[in-house]
Image (cartoon, grey):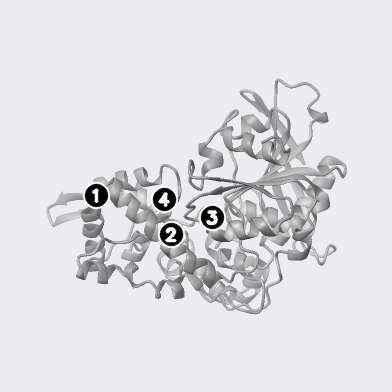
Amino acid sequence: MSDSYRQPGVVLTDRRFTVPLDHADPAGETIEVYGREVAASDKAHQEDLPWLVYLQGGPGFGANRFVGKQAWLGRALKEYRVLLLDQRGTGHSTPANRQTLPLRGGPAAQADYLTHFRADAIVRDCELIRRELTGGDPWTVLGQSFGGFCTVTYLSLAPEGLRTALITGGLPSLDAHADDVYRAAYPRVERKVTAHYARYPQDVERARRIADHLLNHEVVLPNGYRLTVEAFQSLGILLGGGEGSHRLHYLLEHAFVNTPAGPALSDAFQEEVQSLLSYAGHPLYALVHEAIYGQDARPTDWSAERVRAEFPQFDAAKALAGDAPLLFTGESVHPWMFDADPALRPLRETADLLAARTDWRPLYDAERLATNEVPVAAAVYHDDMYVDTAHALTTARAIRGLRTWVTDEFEHDGVRAGGPRVLDRLLALARDEA
């Protein structure tokens, strides 16, 4: 099913695809995956252009929506028809959230269902969609962040479907357990927080004051979210983006107002914080975030929470008692989020079952990657807060023919913040023109 319409400079066609829930059982249950085809309205013979599919970050984010030729998209439309894919369970695809998952049954059935929402299933979806759209011709994939993880899985499972693979901030470790990922992550996050305080030294006291308030008061945001000090610390996820430090600073700048009962967190602060912390729009991110690292019989077992205990400097109470700066945390999911967030509370048991799971399938084929023949180029951000640079470069060396561009010009969101430059550079690398 498709529906076409125009925006300035582009023609948009909404497409829906029916795919198996479990690609190992193609005759079984199906779900729907949504994609938005984007083509430049000023180019003749669009049907003759090759395809590029964009896999966004996450996991669990969808709704790739652009008005006109924004970000990297304008560059891509010069030579491609682009498919913006809402990966299964996200955006306009068949949803998976607190409202729909009970249709599966109880928590055990929900957890079983969610095992089909990892990179391997997304790649299999892409292969079915590719054959329908291109008539069997290979296409180019641009993978951002988790989309890059999916791209490495694509190179492992179905390289015959790829003409070129482009990756931005998304080269995963091929064999690291989630514990390894977070042991590498917490020191990176600490560096980002230290850099933020160097830029905005006044935020040291502001963050400590907010943390102290939360340690001594129960705060429930307007949407029902319980704002604990740990939840406040998780706003450090902003620091992984190019403008994130500034956004965090302006958020902290006017956190308090004076009231008849004394200082209180302002309505404006609470409103912005709940929009940043709520998982209502992307619950899959919380549910399968650690599952994307599962590849063997070891459970992920709430890895980020367990590993955090190895870094006591992130303990807010100890920091305040010792007059140390409060450390924010980064891109991690914790069990307390399923108690704090009303969008996640009904799914706590489901999340616990996923964390305990021990039957994860491999996502990467090291032998196949070592003999890769697909042109691959990857942007590796020098001190990416979300994806460990050392892990990324180890993987880059393991994929035959992959060319890297290591840069400190951008943060994790470089493909969006850099306009056409990042995509230009990757295409040149993949074509051996740079």
In three-dimensional space, the C-alpha distance between marks 1 and 2, rounded to whole angstroms, equals 19 Å
Quadrant assignment for the C terminus: top right
Q: Amino acid at mark 4?
A: Leu
- Residue 224 shows up from this direction: no
Residue 201: mark: 1
Q: Amino acid at mark 2?
A: Arg
Q: Amino acid at mark 3?
A: His
* Residue 297, above or below 9: below
Residue 230, image quadrant: bottom left
Q: Residue at x 64, y 59 (%)?
A: 395
Q: Amino acid at mark 1?
A: Pro
* Camera-side residue of 327 and 98: 327
* Camera-side residue of 34 and 156: 156
Q: Does label 2 or label 3 sit earlier along the sequence?
A: 2
Secondary structure, mark 2, is: helix
Q: Are marks 1 and 2 in contact (CB under 8 Å)?
A: no
Label 2 crowding class (10 Å Cα cut-off): few <14, some 14-19, many 20+?
many
Quickly name the residue at label 4: 238
